[in-house]
């Protein structure tokens, strides 16, 4: 069992950066609340996955190389996405095989954790549900499920929340049809896949849709919205933070140390 | 430019009945497979064992093929080698000519599909009759198989009933599956005895003993290998295993992965022609071993895993792309995930390289593959081979042929921006700042989805207020 580290690196991912920053913020707050310091290297951009999956390995490698340089300390790298975590953990070693900086790539890969995996397996986080009763449907990304093998972590986190009831939908393990550039390159197939996914989720009638992957959320929620009758959706980090801090509505209920930590966390020199 | 693949995909997506047939059938197959593996640990052990058996065989392929040939010959089976499908067809033809045969009856064989054998023979006035029920059905309708195990899976019972009625108007219309099966059986039985040459595929070839193993459910395979006086087996060179003890684990995982059956109805082991005093069996047995690009695949250590395939079809049954577009959309003999890695390698990336793109890389295929073929990794490698510049470093046919100037330039620009954080972040904050001005129509993306909404400010901007170390 890995020991709880003092400090971690956080890699935000490009989708979180642009579309779901709150997911990144919440993820960092959850980690800080557990007493762990967070370093967010500001020069981070993208893990390189889009180019890697499109066959442009040289381009993927140059982008990946720039990221690798941002994580020199021997501490965990936490990523709020199964697919970006999968890129760094599984594919960096493949991408850098035989390259002069292979060792650094392998070292970075060995320190990568998908967020829910980190919260459960490393932080052993204990959650206290402060929210109203709610039903949620979970969509686990294929990368989290198959590449990283961490699909059960999101379930076990939600299982800790006493007022959250999970509802199941048909063909849950099936891909939503996002697949990065696939949605653009094969729009018809992707559309057929996401429309079925939306139908299955709607049948389960959840109050909210939760995932650990912003790409899938973007795809599923965008479709729900266009078809009308969108179900509110959230990244798991944002949902967990909201349920356990209720920062906006009931600050007085908070008994943990999170607020002071988040605000009082000192900064240190550039890594 | 819209390719044939994209056009077919579009046509097939617009057929709700076909989609429903696939969706229903695949759900059933996935459940049946799962029911066969109540013990997850046992499944994983069996997968590891099966992978090892196949990997071992491939690691000594040339040597095993030599042993196989020697033992088959000793057993009285005539072995023929074909580098191309053309050569394979000619070999079959010369055997038919030797026996003055004007027709053959076939068991199920994907390699004969690969050879286009039926068309080849029909052009010469020789009838090739499919005896597998599924193959029989699609042959009646002049179609190609849409699945490697269940060739007529795209049709439902009522469609089949109508087809039978149309082709055999003398027989009363029925939608009863058993009656339909019996009807086909009766028609085919007569043919078995009237035909001198039977042809089949092979599931495993055992080098050690010179044995051909054939897995089947309907009994027609058994008929086509015993009733006619000449039996021709056609298969790919990769189907060899080292010893007899390799067969039981592979057979067990094959049937359970494929149709969710604990074991098949028939398992034929062919070890030679009829011997003096024996009551049945063909007087002559031939084996045609087809290469058709396989030795090229064999020469690449990363792509070699493709040849581990035991053609169970589990990857196809679990593929979310296949289930929606159906087997015919691929325009190839092998559809689905295995087709998407095998066909571009056989025919070249310039011909079928597009299939490697038609995947979300979700990994459902490799999750179920009984011999653990890393299909998504091979897809990724083929995508790379398709657009790489250093084509001298790979054997893959058609390498570099999919590289276009505009796409290459896009990725180059992307890589430049993503390695210059200042520019990258200036771009993203500019985008979020002026998000109201971004287009809401993004072509393909927005046909079923609304345009993605940018946040008010980026994570990079927000981090500054969070008290994390960001300088
Ligand atoms: S690739 Fe694997 S799952 Fe697919 S047909 Fe071959 S053995 Fe079966």
Image (cartoon, rainbow, N blue to C red):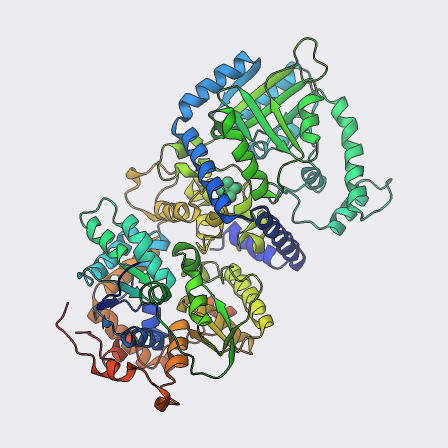
Residue at 49%, 17% in the rendered image: B69
Q: Nearer the viewer, residue B428 or A249?
A: A249
Q: Is residue B11 above or below residue A194?
A: above
Q: Does A171 sit left or right of A40 as displayed?
A: right
Residue B367 in the image, given as x and y percentages of width and height: 47, 49
Residue B322: give x, y in percent of width and height.
55, 52
Which residue corresponds to the image point at 53% horizontal and 52% vertical from the top-left?
B319
Q: Quadrant of residue B172?
A: top right
On the question of residue A209 being in view, the answer is yes
Q: Is residue B401 left or right of residue A194?
A: left
Q: Is residue A50 visible?
A: no
Q: Is residue A29 above or below residue A68?
A: below
Above or below: residue B278 compared with residue B190: above
Q: Quadrant of the C terminus of chain B?
A: bottom left
Q: Nearer the viewer, residue A22 or B88?
A: A22
Please state the horizontal and vertical placement of residue B220, each as a whole percent of the image: 70, 31
């Amino acid at each position: 069992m890995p020991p709880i580290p003092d400090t971690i690196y956080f890699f935000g991912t490009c989708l979180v950066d642009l579309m779901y920053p709150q997911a990144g913020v919440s993820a960092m707050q959850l980690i800080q609340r557990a007493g762990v310091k967070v370093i967010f290297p500001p020069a981070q951009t993208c893990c390189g996955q889009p180019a890697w999956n499109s066959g442009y390995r040289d381009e993927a490698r140059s982008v990946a190389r720039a990221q690798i340089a941002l994580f020199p300390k021997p501490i965990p790298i936490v990523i709020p996405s199964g697919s970006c975590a999968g890129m760094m953990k599984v594919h960096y070693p493949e991408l850098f095989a035989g390259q002069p900086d292979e060792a650094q790539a392998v070292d970075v890969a060995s320190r990568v954790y998908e967020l829910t995996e980190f919260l459960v397996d490393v932080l052993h986080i204990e959650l206290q549900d402060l929210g109203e009763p709610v039903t949620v449907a979970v969509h686990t990304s294929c990368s989290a499920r198959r590449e990283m093998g961490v699909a059960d972590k999101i379930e076990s986190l939600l299982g800790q929340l006493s007022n959250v009831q999970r509802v199941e939908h048909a063909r849950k393990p099936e891909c939503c049809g996002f697949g990065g550039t696939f949605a653009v390159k094969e729009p018809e197939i992707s559309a057929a896949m996401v429309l079925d996914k939306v139908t299955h989720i709607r049948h389960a009638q959840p109050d909210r849709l939760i995932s650990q992957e912003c790409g899938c959320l973007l795809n599923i929620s965008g479709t729900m919205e266009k078809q009308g009758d969108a179900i509110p959706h959230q990244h798991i980090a944002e949902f967990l933070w909201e349920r356990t801090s209720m920062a906006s509505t009931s600050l007085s209920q908070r008994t943990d140390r999170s607020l002071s930590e988040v605000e009082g966390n000192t900064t240190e020199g550039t890594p | 430019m819209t390719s044939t693949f994209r056009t077919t995909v579009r046509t097939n997506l617009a057929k709700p009945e076909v989609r429903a047939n696939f969706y229903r059938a695949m759900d059933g197959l996935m459940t049946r497979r799962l029911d066969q593996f109540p013990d997850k640990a046992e499944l994983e052990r069996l997968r590891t064992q099966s992978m090892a058996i196949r990997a071992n065989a491939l690691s000594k392929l040339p040597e095993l093929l030599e042993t196989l040939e020697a033992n088959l010959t000793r057993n009285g089976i005539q072995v023929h080698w074909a580098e191309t499908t053309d050569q394979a067809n000619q070999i079959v033809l010369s055997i038919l000519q030797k026996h003055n045969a004007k027709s053959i009856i076939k068991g199920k064989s994907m390699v004969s599909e690969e050879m286009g054998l039926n068309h080849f023979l029909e052009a010469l006035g020789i009838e090739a009759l499919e005896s597998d029920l599924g193959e029989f059905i699609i042959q009646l309708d002049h179609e190609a198989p849409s699945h490697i195990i269940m060739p007529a899976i795209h049709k439902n019972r009522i469609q089949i009933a109508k087809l039978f009625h149309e082709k055999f108007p003398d027989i009363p219309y029925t939608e009863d599956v058993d009656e339909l099966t019996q009807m086909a059986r009766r028609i085919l039985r007569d043919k078995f005895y009237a035909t001198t040459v039977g042809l089949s595929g092979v599931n495993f070839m055992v080098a050690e003993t010179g044995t051909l193993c054939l897995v089947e459910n309907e009994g027609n395979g058994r008929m086509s290998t015993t009733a006619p006086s000449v039996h021709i087996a056609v298969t790919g060179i990769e189907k060899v295993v080292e010893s007899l003890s390799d067969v039981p684990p592979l057979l067990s995982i094959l049937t359970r992965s494929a149709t969710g059956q604990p074991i098949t109805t028939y398992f034929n082991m062919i070890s030679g022609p009829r011997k003096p005093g024996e009551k049945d069996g063909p007087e002559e047995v031939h084996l045609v071993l087809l290469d058709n690009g396989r030795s090229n695949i064999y020469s690449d250590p990363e792509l070699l895993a493709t040849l581990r395939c035991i053609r169970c079809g589990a990857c196809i049954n679990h593929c979310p792309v296949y289930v929606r577009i159906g087997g015919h959309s691929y325009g190839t003999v092998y559809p689905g995930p295995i087709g998407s890695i095998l066909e571009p390698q056989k025919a070249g990336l310039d011909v079928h390289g597009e299939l490697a793109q038609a995947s979300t890389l979700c990994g459902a295929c490799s999750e179920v593959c009984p011999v653990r073929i890393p299909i998504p990794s091979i897809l990724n490698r083929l995508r790379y081979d398709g657009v790489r510049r250093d084509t001298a470093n790979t054997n893959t046919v058609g390498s570099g042929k999919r590289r276009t100037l505009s796409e290459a330039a896009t990725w180059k620009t992307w890589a430049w921006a993503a390695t210059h954080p200042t520019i990258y972040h200036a771009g993203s904050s500019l985008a979020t700042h002026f998000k109201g001005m971004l287009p809401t129509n993004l072509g393909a993306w927005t046909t079923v989805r609304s345009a993605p909404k940018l946040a008010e400010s980026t994570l990079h901007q927000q981090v500054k207020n969070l008290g994390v170390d960001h300088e």
